[in-house]
Image (spheres, grey):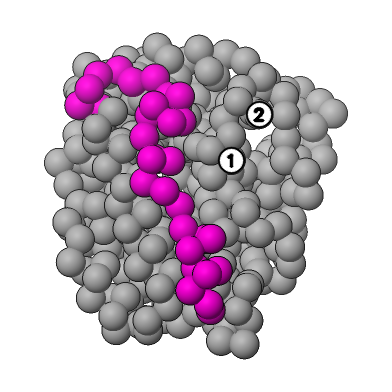
Amino acid sequence: MSIVLQRLLRIRLEETTFARRRFSSSSDSARRSLERVGETFLRGYHAALADRGADVLSAELEGIEHELQGFAYEGASMALDVLDQLAPWKGGRVQAFLAGPGKRHIYMVHVGAGWSMARLRFRLERRLSRLDPLLRWLALDGFGFHEGYFHWWRYADGQSLPAGLHAYQLRAFDQGLGRSLWFVGGAGCERISRLLSRFPASRLGDLWSGIGLACAYAGAADEGEIERLRSAAGKYSPHLAQGAVFAAKTRERAGSLVPHTDLACRIICGLPAIEAATIADRMLPQASEGSGPDCPSYEIWRSRIRMHFPEAGQSGEPGEEEYGSERKRGTGAYLKEEKENVQQSAL
């Protein structure tokens, strides 16, 4: 790829500041912590954009502070997918990254590919088909995070949906949009709750799941703020817990469990992070357990994790009446059958 095109694709560091994004923050420490996430993401993105080969990229990523490495791998994956689309004669970069240095960060690599999909919205189905059958939905999570992070005002009314996505793709998008609200709201429960108040009930479960993941993975909140978040989640607390479990699993696989992840899991899940991560392993479905685009195996996995927590299966799961005309989003009549399947599984 030409130097000129690489320069055009660069993202200025200023774009990750709260001032530029017009985010609020609960404290200066929370703001700085979340800004460091963005800075690290761009470090990985620009390292991969240079396209100097896997060994050089791996060395640069591994030199980043352990706690933040996942964000660098996420940024690198975005750049690699951008390169795959704009310089296809050297394609397969993301797949090679997943098979090599990105293997430990497989979840973040899938999320990062979704950032690229949000910016280059062509051949989406083809690109998704090349990712892991279970984890490809994380790319659409990344798509949603990108949109919330860079264009949150487009979705602030709680009604707007991205064009071109359908069925469960829109639910995965909302999971990423929820993660972005952790940044938009500056890790502050009060601000995040105000943002959520504009969304219909049918979308809240997925949004709370994303918030739980961001809280436990990115951190930036103290014990009191996390406790307020758990209380604010109310009947959606199983969704919040499922997100925290995913965060714990993501860090456990990468070998980067940190105190703030453990704190969040203890408060939200009632378990230390290492035990929360094992829930993700135990609830993992077989590939054959999915039932099409409306209920992929990925959603069965998430649902089983939610059912592990006390509130799940009672009021934590939205009923069919809440979806109404939104069945097109892939969140319709499968819920009753899914619950029956989950109850029969070995939990």
In percent of width and height, residue 104 lies at: 31, 69
User: In the rendered structure, are the residues bearing label 2 and label 1 in contact, judged by CB atoms less than 8 Å apart?
Assistant: yes
* Total tally of numbered discs in the picture: 2
* Percent x, y of residue 123: 74, 67
- The disc at residue 119 is none
Residue 297 highlighted magenta (yes or no): no
Front residue of 29/283: it is: 29
Q: Which residue has dot 1 on it?
A: 147
Q: Is residue 231 above or below residue 113?
A: above
Whichever of callouts 2 and 1 sits on the residue coming sooner in the sequence is: 1
Q: As shown in the figure, which amino acid type bears the numbered disc 1?
A: Glu
In 3D space, how far apart are the residues under numbered discs 2 and 1 (Cα atoms)? 8 Å
- Disc 2 packing (10 Å; few <14; some 14–19; many ≥20): some
Residue ID for mark 2:
154
Q: Is residue 200 above or below residue 341?
A: above
Q: Establish if 166 lies above or below 4.
A: above
